[in-house]
Image: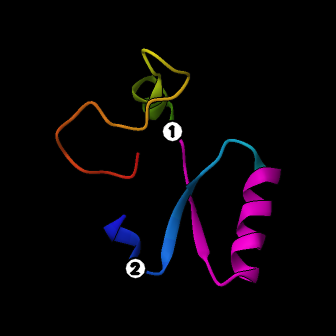
Amino acid sequence: MVALGNDTAGLFANDDDLADSLSNSGKSTFEDVWRLPIMKEHRETMKGAHSDLNNKGKTPYGGAS
């Protein structure tokens, strides 16, 4: 994701323990992550037709999710 630059990955997680673990792992391996929110309006867009999760948005615009 361009907005975070070349050295930081965006992290979406709905589990605080998992997010903390991934963040700590990233710090120890010099792979920084920045946790981003999953808002109510994102949830409908994320539902998959053929899977539990769709990671392609429904608009032609680029984005994080």
Q: Residue at x 50, y 75 (%)?
A: 8
Upstream in sequence: badge 1 or badge 2: 2
Q: Nearer the viewer, mark 1 or mark 2?
A: 2
Q: Position of residue 26 (x, y in %)?
A: 69, 73
State the quadrant of the N terminus.
Answer: bottom left
Q: Residue at x 32, y 69 (%)?
A: 2
Task: Report the residue marked by disc 1.
Answer: 39
Q: Position of residue 38 (x, y in %)?
A: 54, 42
Vertical arrangement, residue 44 with respect to residue 63, above or below = above
In this rendering, position of residue 31 left or right of residue 21: left
Q: Tell me where the magenta segment starts and ends, as one range.
A: 17-38
Q: Amino acid at mark 1?
A: Met
50 in the magenta segment = no
In this rendering, position of residue 26 left or right of residue 17: left
Please rate how many residues cluster around mark 1, counting C-alpha atoms within 10 Å: few if below 14, some from 14 to 19, many from 20: few
- Which of the two residues, 30 or 3, is positioned nearer the viewer here? 30
Residue reaching furthest to the left: 60
Dividing the picture into quadrants, the one containing residue 20 is bottom right
Task: Report the residue marked by disc 2.
Answer: 6
Count of numbered labels shown in the rendering: 2
In this rendering, position of residue 14 left or right of residue 46: right
Please rate how many residues cluster around mark 2, counting C-alpha atoms within 10 Å: few if below 14, some from 14 to 19, many from 20: few
| Mark 1 and mark 2 residues within 8 Å of each other at the beta carbon | no
Vertical arrangement, residue 37 with respect to residue 33, above or below = above
28 in the magenta segment = yes
- Which of the two residues, 55 or 44, is positioned nearer the viewer here? 55
Residue reaching furthest to the front: 50
